[in-house]
Image: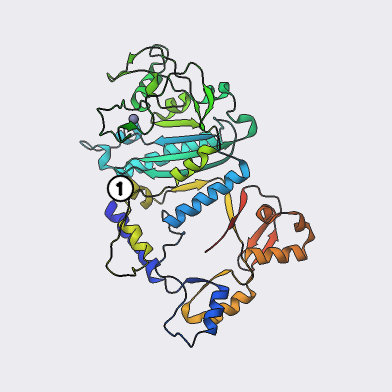
């Protein structure tokens, strides 16, 4: 699977590499300056070498753009209210039933990817269509793969005003951080015991992934708490009563301070690790978004003897990313890595003659001629305002709700009905 995916990816990257020279981006003014000085320096071609464009899913530019798009949603609707992480359970019946004799789930990344895709689809349906956590105004989700493999999804939800978990009663309804009673809720008890217990970690378990310089990075064990407290540094402190130590089904001796917050309905329905957290303040949002869009966490250092090194983003990308079999299977199936409920219209802002234009180095004169008459979203907006007075009362950033930008004609066209699934975002290019 990894080999097959790497070949597919290499083909795409190769196409990008081969077509770099055809498409260079430069400011209109820079090109005019270049034309003026053309004869003095024949070696000089404007633009930059080997760029990995944002259209390539998973590239640093793509991640950055998704982050900015997500922040545009926050600008419009406010901070997310719930942060949900769903992890694949390799013991799901749908996976184990379809294994061949003697196989384990590690041998079947195809099954893992397809079953997780279906479960996630159902979970998103429960949230977005069935409104099990309240009516969402916007949803953003991102798929991530741990280094050794299993997929998980980070979901951010912005809820309608009346459903925001603003009271401790509502928080307690959605999120639970205690071990359920084994007599009253035997099935929930066993699922929590299996999937929602952190560690236990301490000074003698330094090899656990959560341990960073002798401390648990997730801050377990959590302190006991008789009642939920709404906001402590961006997160609520959930109720964790000190009702003694119990032995769980698999023999661990544990109390409520080790429970990862969960939603009972989701656990019972999906039987996997599903962490549900309430975001109490705007402080936690940027961290969450950075975390969600952090991209591949592998560093790449280049030491060179030459004074100048080739600026090659494609090579940097392939040299410093991890591909696991489940990710390869996921991407070969063309499953989405990222999705949001809203479309983001990117709006340019630039000084006169400073707009970016794409051109072929052999056809600079033609590029300059076309750019002279080709409107950007900004110049087209100026024209719209001059010719169409109803647009005068709408801010540039809100214009995509009422008008669509026709890329061919380079014009803003009025929508038949107002569209609030499209959000404008100002972009600046350097
Ligand atoms: Zn820990």
Disc 1: which residue? 324
Disc 1 Cβ-to-ligand 1 distance below 8 Å = no
Which residue reaches farthest right?
389
Q: Going 50% across and 85% down the picture, which residue do you hit?
A: 38
Q: Quadrant of ligand 1?
A: top left
| Residue 23 visible to an observer of this rendering | yes
Classify 201 as above or below 367: above
Q: Residues within 10 Å of mark 1 (few under 14, many from 20)?
A: some
Q: Going 64% across and 75% down the picture, which residue do you hit?
A: 373
Tell me how the rendering is colored: rainbow
Which structural element holds mark 1?
Answer: loop
Is 399 left or right of 59, judged from the image as shown?
right
Classify 373 as above or below 386: below
| Residue 97 visible to an observer of this rendering | no
Count the marks: 1
Nearer the observer, 115 or 309: 309
- Residue 303 position within the rendered picture, expressed as x and y whole percent measured from the top left: 28, 62
Which residue reaches farthest left?
102
- Residue 99 position within the rendered picture, expressed as x and y whole percent measured from the top left: 27, 37
Q: Going 29% across and 70% down the picture, which residue do you hit?
A: 306
- Residue 177 position within the rendered picture, expressed as x and y whole percent measured from the top left: 44, 23
Classify 275 as above or below 6: above
Q: Going 55% across and 81% down the picture, which residue do you hit?
A: 366
Nearer the observer, 110 or 77: 77
- Residue 175 position within the rendered picture, expressed as x and y whole percent measured from the top left: 49, 25
Is 62 left or right of 92, judged from the image as shown?
right
Residue 194 location, quadrant:
top left
Residue 88 location, quadrant:
top left
Classify 315 as above or below 419: below
């Amino acid at each position: 699977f990894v080999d097959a995916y790497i070949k597919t990816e290499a083909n795409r990257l190769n196409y990008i590499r081969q077509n770099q020279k055809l498409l260079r981006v430069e400011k209109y003014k820079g090109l005019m300056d270049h034309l003026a000085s053309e004869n003095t320096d024949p070696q000089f071609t404007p633009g930059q070498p080997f760029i990995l464009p944002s259209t390539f899913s998973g590239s640093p530019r793509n991640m950055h753009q998704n982050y900015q798009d997500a922040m545009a949603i926050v600008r419009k609707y406010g901070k997310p209210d719930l942060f949900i992480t769903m992890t694949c359970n390799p013991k799901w019946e749908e996976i184990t039933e379809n294994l061949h004799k003697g196989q384990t789930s590690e041998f079947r990344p195809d099954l893992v990817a397809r079953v997780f895709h279906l479960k996630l689809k159902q979970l998103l349906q429960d949230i977005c269509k069935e409104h099990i956590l309240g009516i969402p105004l916007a949803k953003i989700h991102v798929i991530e793969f741990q280094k050794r493999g299993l997929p998980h999804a980070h979901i951010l939800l912005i809820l309608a005003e009346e459903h925001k978990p603003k009271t401790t009663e509502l928080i307690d309804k959605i999120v639970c951080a205690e071990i359920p009673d084994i007599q009253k809720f035997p099935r929930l008890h066993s699922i929590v015991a299996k999937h929602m217990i952190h560690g236990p970690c301490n000074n003698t378990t330094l090899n656990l992934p959560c341990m960073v310089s002798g401390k648990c990075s997730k801050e377990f064990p959590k302190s006991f708490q008789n009642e939920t407290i709404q906001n402590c540094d961006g997160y609520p402190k959930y109720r964790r009563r000190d009702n003694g130590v119990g032995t769980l089904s698999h023999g661990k001796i544990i109390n409520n301070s080790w429970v990862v917050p969960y939603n009972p309905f989701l656990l019972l329905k999906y039987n996997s690790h599903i962490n549900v957290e309430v975001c109490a303040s705007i402080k936690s949002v940027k961290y969450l978004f950075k975390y969600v869009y952090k991209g591949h966490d592998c560093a790449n250092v280049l030491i060179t003897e030459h004074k100048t090194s080739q600026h090659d983003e494609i090579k940097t990308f392939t040299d410093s990313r991890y591909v696991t079999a489940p990710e390869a299977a996921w991407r070969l199936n063309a499953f989405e890595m990222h999705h949001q409920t809203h479309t983001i219209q990117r709006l340019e802002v630039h000084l006169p003659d400073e707009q970016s234009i794409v051109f072929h180095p052999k056809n600079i004169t033609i590029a300059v001629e076309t750019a002279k008459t080709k409107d950007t979203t900004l110049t087209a907006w100026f024209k719209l305002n001059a010719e169409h007075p109803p647009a005068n009362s709408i801010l540039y950033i809100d214009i995509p709700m009422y008008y669509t930008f026709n890329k061919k004609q380079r014009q803003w066209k009025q929508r038949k009905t107002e569209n609030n699934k499209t959000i404008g975002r100002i972009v600046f290019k350097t």
